[in-house]
Image: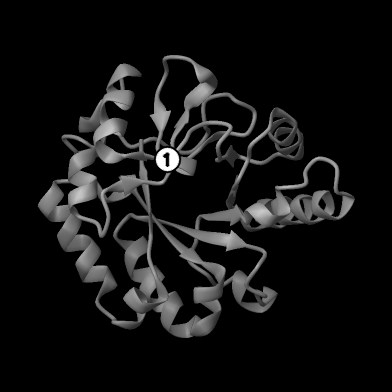
Amino acid sequence: LFVAVNVSGRQIKRGALVSQVSDALARAGADLRCLEIEITEHTLVEDVTANIATLTGLREQGMRIAVDDFGTGLSSLAYLKRLPIDKFKIDRSFVRELPYAAGDVAIVTAIISMARALGLQVVAEGVETDAQRELLARLGCDFAQGYLFGSPMPAHELDPLLRSRNVDWSRAGLASTSEVASNGDAGDVSGSDVCVVGGDTREVCPDAVSASGEEPSHPRCR
């Protein structure tokens, strides 16, 4: 079980993100390995050198890094290989017309292939239909998130949902989702990030489910 948190360009530019995240996790008693930091591709390209330094600092502490809205920020392939990241999140604009738009199929296929070559995992955002999920699974996408799996809900509603699926919060070092919300800027948990793994009573992953509908292959916190 892990929790993904978006950070803004402003937070990174302040230069204190690494210490702020570490302090927040220490107060919550959470395991650093159970936190995934999401940064948009647009933010990354604003100051590549400084951002690489910040993300490296976070990753060295055990956190995972994901590039959000990938495919929309005009990334330079020259620096993609330098980024200390673990995951690409394919922007929903490339998923919306799947599986019928040949251009989008080609782009998504290319992103997944590039991620594989770089040793990264892939999440498809904005998945709303079984046809989209099935195509993404065939293409080798690791995870999918979207309204096909869950709707927006506040933290106090997510907590009992997870407990009903027998999720043990202690594995992430957290008492409940209220602790997560209390350390952030908002109390709501993104609905597109709430998904039932495998569609049964196994774990709920607050980030995504595998595109095939099976249990995700990402490492679990011990």
Residue furthest to the top: 201
Q: Is residue 108 left or right of residue 103?
A: left
* Residue 211 found in image quarter: top right
- Which residue is disc 1 drawn over? 152
- Look at 42% across and 18% down and name the residue there: 202
Where disc 1 sits, the SS reads loop
- Look at 71% across and 57% down and name the residue there: 114
* Residue 141 found in image quarter: top right
Residue 123 pos. (x, y %)? 58, 46
The N terminus sits in image quarter: top left
Residue 196 pos. (x, y %)? 47, 26
Q: How is the image coloured?
A: one colour
Amino acid type indicated by mark 1: Pro
- Look at 44% across and 41% down and name the residue there: 191
Instruction: State how many labels appear.
Output: 1
Q: Is residue 41 left or right of residue 179?
A: right
Nearest the eye: 163 or 18: 163
Nearest the eye: 26 or 100: 100
Residue 68 pos. (x, y %)? 53, 60
Residue 86 pos. (x, y %)? 50, 55
Seen in the picture, residue 207 relative to 46 is either above or below; the reply is above
- Look at 15% across and 62% down and name the residue there: 23
Nearest the eye: 201 or 60: 201
